[in-house]
Structure formats: C-alpha cells, structure tokens
Amino acid sequence: MRRMRGESMVSLLIGLAMGLMVISAGIHLWMTTLKSQRTALQESHLAQDLRTAMAWMVQDIRRAQYVNGAWRTRIKSTCKDDFCGAAEDFNVSANQIEFSWDRNDNGSKDNNECTGFKLNSNALQAKTACDPAVWSAITDAASIKVMSLEFTSRCSWVQGSLLRHITVQITAASPNDPHTLVTQKQSIALHNAIPATALAGDCT
C-alpha cells in the first residue's frame, strides 16, 4: 500500500498564523472605521447643539437696547429711556454679555427684560431677570461640554450714532471624548443704534 502524505505540523501552524493575521487586520480596519464614524457623529451632534445655542444668542443680541419709539428718546447727545444708561442695559466683557430690550413695547423696563449670556461650569447660561439677576442653563453639560465662550465688540460712528458689532465664538467638546472639539463663530450687527456719547467705553 502507498503511504498517504499529509501536511506537516509546521505548514499548518504557518497557515493558521497567516489566517489570524488577515483576521486581525480586518478587525483593526473595522474598529478604525467604527471610531471614525463615531467621531463624525459626535461632531455632527455637537455642531447641531452649538448652532441651536448660537441661533438663540444671535436672535437676542441683535435686539439689545431696543425700545419702541427710540427716535423720540434717543438723539445725538442723550439717551432718555429705560433701556439706555444702566450697566445691565449693555455690558460686554471677554466671556459675558448683558443687555436689556423692550420685549412688550411698553417703553418701561420690566423685570424680565434683562438678558445676557455667560459660561458657567461648562454650560451656557442665559439671564432671565433684572433684579435679582437670574441665570438659567440653556445647554446640558451631560450632552455638550462648552469649553469657552468669547465676546469681542467693535463700534462705528454714523451721523452721531453708535453702531455696534459683537463677535461670538463658542468652543465645545463631547463629554465622552474631550478630543472631539467643535468651534463656531459669528459676527452680529446690533439693530439698535444709540447716541455716540452713551457707551463710548464699550467700543474698540
């Protein structure tokens, strides 16, 4: 009888090792793809959350110091209404803004007509009352971790009136992955001009 010839143990081990290498490379590629998709999804969620917060801020900041009938109370040298003159009416620092505006068009500053935005404990907060000042979170730190909030202001003088522009920049990270960062920046032209002498100190 002829002797049956089979594969040697060494050949089997080499084939097994090569198969494991191919499987390992496939698993690594699959995990890399999943990680990339997860990062892209986190960035998309962060960007959407930031867009929502930014839209809220832009809408309110544009209305800063609005008052019905401003043409009667604001002339080139004076500002004689309830929304012009106090620190709560317009105040900008590097990471906080406060302002007031006439929500109900009655010409008087009600307690809910002071607003503003600041960063506190990685959450954006909005001001909802004048006295005492009340700040409420508008982002959830469990789903979006706001790392920085920056305001810069510049002004232009047009026929004795002060036109203001505020630039807002927000940077946020995913609470589960601090390396996933998203930044949004927007420049806002305030609709409501004030006399040139009213807030010259807030202009650059």
Image (cartoon, rainbow, N blue to C red):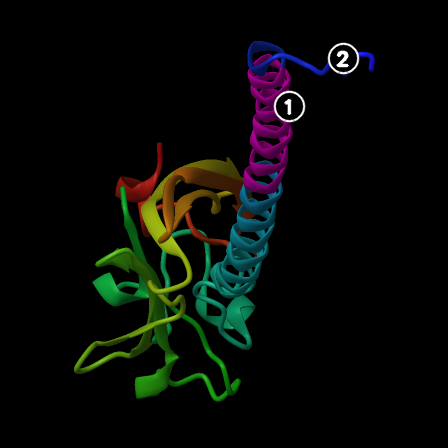
Q: Is residue 24 magenta?
A: yes
**Location of residue 55 with respect to 155 vertically, above or below:** below
Residue 94 place in picture, x, y as percent: 27, 42
Could you say where residue 63 lies in the image, as x and y percent from the top left? 52, 65
Asked whether residue 86 is in view, the answer is: no
- The residue shown at (56%, 10%) is 10
Q: In the rendered image, which quarter contains the N terminus?
A: top right
Seen in the picture, residue 109 relative to 66 is either above or below; the reply is below
SS of the residue under disc 2: loop
Disc sitting over residue 133 in the figure = none
* Residue found 56% across the figure and 47% down from its top: 189
Which is more foreground, mark 2 or mark 1? 2
Which kind of residue does numbered mark 1 sit on?
Gly
Q: Is residue 135 found inside the magenta-colored segment of the image? A: no
Which of the two residues, 26 or 117, is positioned nearer the viewer here?
26
Badge 2 or badge 1: first in the primary sequence: 2
Q: Amino acid at mark 2?
A: Arg
Magenta highlight range: 12-35
In this view, the residue in front, 55 or 145, is: 145
Front-most of residues 4 and 182 = 4
